[in-house]
Image: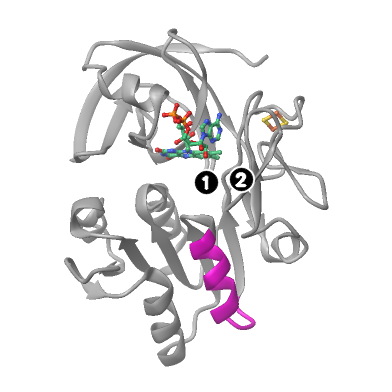
Amino acid sequence: MDKRYTLKIDKIIEETSDIKTFTFKYTLGANPGQFIMLTDFEGGEKPFSISDCTKEEFSITVKRIGEFTTRLFQKCVGDYVSIRGAYGSSFFISKNKVLLVGGGYAVPTFYFFAKVLLEAGANVTLINGARTKAEHVFADRFESLDIKVINTTDDGSFGENGTAVDIAQKIMSQDNFNFLYASGPEMMMKALQDVIGDTNYEFLFERYMKCAIGICGNCTMDPLGLRLCVEGPVLPKEKVEQLTEFGKYHRDASGKRHEL
Ligand SMILES: Cc1cc2nc3c(=O)[nH]c(=O)nc-3n(C[C@H](O)[C@H](O)[C@H](O)COP(=O)(O)OP(=O)(O)OC[C@H]3O[C@@H](n4cnc5c(N)ncnc54)[C@H](O)[C@@H]3O)c2cc1C
Ligand code: FES
């Protein structure tokens, strides 16, 4: 196993009633798209993408879903957790005109990425989607960056009315982008793949992870046997196009298949 680091929670931001950002003063040295494994010493260890990373600190943004994340939500500033990583592949840093399409709790990782793209000189447009205004995150932080932001909600309660895919299709019919990146629910990325034509892309995937270092095989994707914790979680177009399980099923901790 890789080295673990016990870290004190330095800051907690309540983004919505079900999403919080936790910041740690620690030089992680991660690249955009990578993730860490985190344990609270009370059982289990879970993967979380990095939503911001500077020389001095890094953040993760967590949605409360089940037992582990509910316990994490009870933590306070000054409490300790343990992490290992950063792990996995990272996004290609384009210097051109790029479109980022994000949905739900998977959008914040684009905050870290957008900052790196800007440093590289890219022209960045972001579609920040959520189902409702109450679930929409990071609008203020993205507004502080020199990028074009299109906020959207499925029910029209904030920003444009429509899914992130609807808006992506609309703006791609009006404008050309050299590269597209997506991070969000898998069915969103599947629908996106159907409307983006020949545009080159990378997608950030989530699969059940245990070891995160390529040993257990729990995160492999059919039929390539790609270990998402090592060869992913960011996969390029040529790999995504070969995945027969994309948008169809995923596996739980025991390896049993579940339809998406
Ligand atoms: C590469 C990667 C990056 C992720 N980034 C984020 C993030 O930035 N923010 C965030 O809120 N969540 C993220 N997740 C998902 C997060 O790991 C799960 O939401 C969390 O593990 C749920 O745990 P739980 O006990 O609260 O819920 P549970 O009730 O145990 O699980 C709810 C669902 O979460 C997923 N899940 C549970 N355990 C794991 C696991 N070990 N590996 C992968 N998925 C799991 C499964 O789909 C499961 O059905 C990421 C997952 C991966 C693989
Ligand atoms: S989580 Fe074990 S191989 Fe990826």
Seen at 47% across and 21% down, the residue is: 38
- Identify the image quadrant of residue 22: top left
Q: For numbered disc 1, what is the local secondary structure? A: loop
Q: Verify whether residue 195 appears in magenta.
A: yes
Location of residue 83 with respect to 213 vertically, above or below: above
Could you tell me residue 235's position as x and y percent?
Answer: 66, 54
Q: Mark 2: which amino acid?
A: Pro
Seen at 61% across and 45% down, the residue is: 233
Q: Position of 250 compared to 73: left or right?
A: right
Could you tell me residue 27's position as x and y percent?
Answer: 43, 25
Seen at 48% across and 11% down, the residue is: 43
Q: Mark 1: which amino acid?
A: Gly
- Of 94 and 126, which appears nearest the observer? 126
- Of 11 and 119, which appears nearest the observer? 11
What stretch of residues is rendered in magenta? 187-199
Query: Mostly what secondary structure, the magenta segment?
Result: helix
Residue under pointer 2? 233
The label on residue 256 is none
| Nearer-N-terminus badge (1/2) | 1
Quick check: is the Cβ at mark 1 less than 8 Å away from ligand 1?
A: no
Q: Given contact means CB atoms under 8 Å apart, are the residues at marks 1 and 2 in contact?
A: yes
Residue under pointer 1? 33
Using the numbered discs, state the Cα–Cα distance from disc 1 to disc 2 in whole angstroms: 7 Å
- Ligand 2 rendered quadrant: top right
Point out the residue furthest to the right here: 224
Could you tell me residue 106's position as x and y percent?
Answer: 42, 49
Label 1 or label 2, whichever lies nearer to me, is 2
Q: For numbered disc 2, what is the local secondary structure? A: loop
Seen at 28% across and 24% down, the residue is: 73
Number of dots carrying numbers: 2
Q: Position of 85 compared to 50: left or right?
A: right
